[in-house]
Image (cartoon, rainbow, N blue to C red):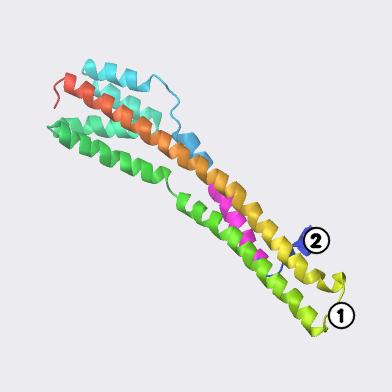
Amino acid sequence: MSNIISFLVKGGPLVIPILFCSLLSFALICERVYRFHKARHKDPLFIERIKELLMQDQHKEALQQCKITKSPIGNIIAKGIEKSYTIRGRDELEKALSHAGQLELRELDRYLPTLATIANIAPLLGLFGTVTGMIKAFMVIQNLGGKVNASVLAGGIWEALLTTALGLGVAIPTVVAYNYFVGKVENFAHEMQDSSIQLLETIQKKQVI
């Protein structure tokens, strides 16, 4: 442990914010993985079962099935079924479903802007460390009148290279995770839209609206 600390100390003060970014990124990635796992729809026949229940006028049973799933799609379908009792008109019900979908997507999209910010900031901090490290190296050269060897410049070179490596080491996995989560959100959006359309068509068949 002491070796790691002494190794990081050679990177200078900018190692601290880079390490903070790495810890924050790791925590957010773990939280989003857990959230997307919970949001994943585990029953491929869910919407077909809901449509069948609605066609049989078993609205309470359909709502119960939506609550059991505990998924974003289930929440949207449940909201649509509830609104179908009070809303008359396809346009209004579409707006209600769209609003419910936006709320669910907002929850799925949470913390993704923070990950994007970390992915942008980490390499910049590394670059900043590179600049400050090279400045120190050239200051040493100037102070010694150009009569220096590699060991004298080692401190500045360490800081320059280490902060760059750490910044990229944080940014690369963060970018990968961010793009993965964005893709997941888009997939959920398409699934929500398809499910909402199927619900509207089923309700229309039963002339609820």
**One can see residue 30 in this view:** no
- Using residue 7 as the reference point, say whether residue 189 is left or right of it: left
Q: Where is residue 26 in the image (x, y as percent from the top left)?
A: 59, 50
Rendered view: 28 above or below 138: above
In the image, 19 versus 50, the foreground residue is 19
| Amino acid identity at mark 2 | Ser
Q: Position of residue 43 (x, y in %)?
A: 42, 22
Examine the residues drawn in magenta and state their main secondary structure.
helix
Residue at the (14%, 34%) spot, across then down:
87
Please state the total of marks drawn on the protein image. Answer: 2
Is disc 1 placed on a helix, strand or loop? loop
**One can see residue 141 in this view:** yes
Residue pushed farthest left? 88
Rendered view: 161 above or below 202: below
| Amino acid identity at mark 1 | Lys
CA gap between label 1 and label 2 equals: 33 Å
Question: Tag 1: Cα neighbours inside 10 Å, few (<14), some, or many (≥20)?
Answer: few
In the image, 208 versus 168, the foreground residue is 168
Question: Tag 2: Cα neighbours inside 10 Å, few (<14), some, or many (≥20)?
Answer: few
Comes first in the chain, label 1 or label 2: 2
Q: Quadrant of the C terminus?
A: top left
- Using residue 186 as the reference point, say whether residue 54 is left or right of it: left
Q: What stretch is highlighted in magenta?
A: 15-29
Image quadrant assignment for residue 190: top left
Image quadrant assignment for residue 163: bottom right
- Using residue 97 as the reference point, say whether residue 165 is left or right of it: right
Residue at mark 1: 147
Rendered view: 200 above or below 17: above
Residue at mark 2: 2
Residue at the (77%, 65%) spot, across then down:
158
- Using residue 31 as the reference point, say whether residue 198 is left or right of it: left
Q: Position of residue 139 (x, y in %)?
A: 74, 80
